[in-house]
Image (cartoon, rainbow, N blue to C red):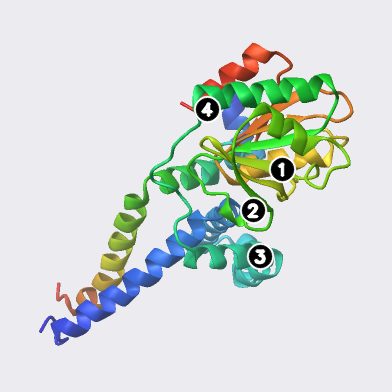
Amino acid sequence: MMKKLATLIFEPFKFFASRNFAEKLSVYLTKNPVVVVIISIIVTLTIIFFTYIFPNITW
Amino acid sequence: MIFGTPIWKLIVDAYVIWVMVFFFMKFLVTNKKILSVILSFVFIYIIAYFANYFGIIVSSIILDYLTEWLPIALIVVMAPDLRRSIENIWKADTKRDNIVMGSEKTKQNIVDAAMFLSSQQIGALMTIEKHNTLDQYSDRAIQMNSIVSKEILINIFTPNTPLHDGAVIIRGDQILCAGAYFVLSDNQNFDKTMGSRHRAGLGISEVSDSLTIIVSEETGSVSIAVEGIMLKLNDRDKLMEYINMFMK
């Protein structure tokens, strides 16, 4: 635990690189293509919300 | 009308945005290197945001400068990977849904051939296809479409014959082609003295879910490469065990 914390403080890039997030994420999204579609829909709805709906909301 | 915008306009806009986001996601997923760089960028952008938010002067100046130039740096540094990813987006899915793996006889023939070639110190490279199609490599090789047999495999790799250089691709019970050339692995973790045959075997295992059997010409040792990992197996039973696990 202390070693992990020390790595995070002194070598933050190494800390993230050694966890291989990109590899894990890529493998997961390749195996589950539906997740890509779902994330795309969420991002699209967020953009639509902030473009069309959010500016017109009166608080 | 939703907030003064016709519904059809909203739907069309949403659809176009969705298509672009979807393609961008696919673009990222197809290349681990780009995804890795993009994640680093996200990390730097988050730090830059907090540096600005808390008014850390020197850091925010440097980070602002970095965030401005990073996209250009990405294009310059990752140009070959970007090109490959863009090509892959438009390609049909290279996964085969209905795969047929080889029979027991095929497995026996492959192992027999590998052990014989090893005993004679004849170099060989045999790739067994799984879900990811290897058509892009077989198209440029010598088509065979013959039933797998020990004799044919030995004959293919016999030195000074036209087909001995390159890899054999096996699909199910068939030898799809011989003399196929793969992209060599640039993995720095492996011995620098590792030959091009081993690097080719490792290279194809990194980009597909295939299993490759490599017989060294110098030492006669038998190795397998799968999912970017290479294992030396000089034992017939161990080789059979791995092939059984892979081809089930």
Q: Where's residue A59, x and y in %? A: 15, 72
Q: Secondary structure at mark 3?
A: helix
Element under disc 1: strand
Going by the numbered disc 1, the residue's amino acid type is Ala
Dot 1: few (<14), some (14–19), or many (≥20) neighbours within 10 Å? Answer: many
Marks 3 and 2 share the same chain? yes
- Marks 1 and 4: which is nearer the front? 1
**Which residue is under mark 2?**
B137
Which residue lies at the image location 79% right of the left edge and 39% below the top edge?
Answer: B197
Residue under the point 52% across and 55% down: B30
Q: Earlier in the sequence, mark 4 or mark 3?
A: 3
Read off the residue under disc 1: B167
Q: Do marks 4 and 3 share a chain? A: yes
Q: Position of residue B139 (x, y in %)?
A: 62, 57
Q: Earlier in the sequence, mark 3 or mark 1?
A: 3
Chain under callout 3: B
Residue B107: image location, x then y, percent: 57, 24
- Residue B135: give x, y in percent of width and height: 57, 53
Mark closer to the chain start, 3 or 2:
3
Q: Which badge, 4 or 2, is on the more N-terminal residue?
A: 2
Q: Residue at 42%, 48% (x, y): give it.
A: A29
Three-letter amino acid code at disc 4? Phe
Tell me the CA gap for discs 1 and 4. 19 Å
Please give the name of the residue rendered at 80% of the width and 44% of the height, measured from the top-left corner: B165
Q: Which is more toward the observer, A42 or B217?
A: B217
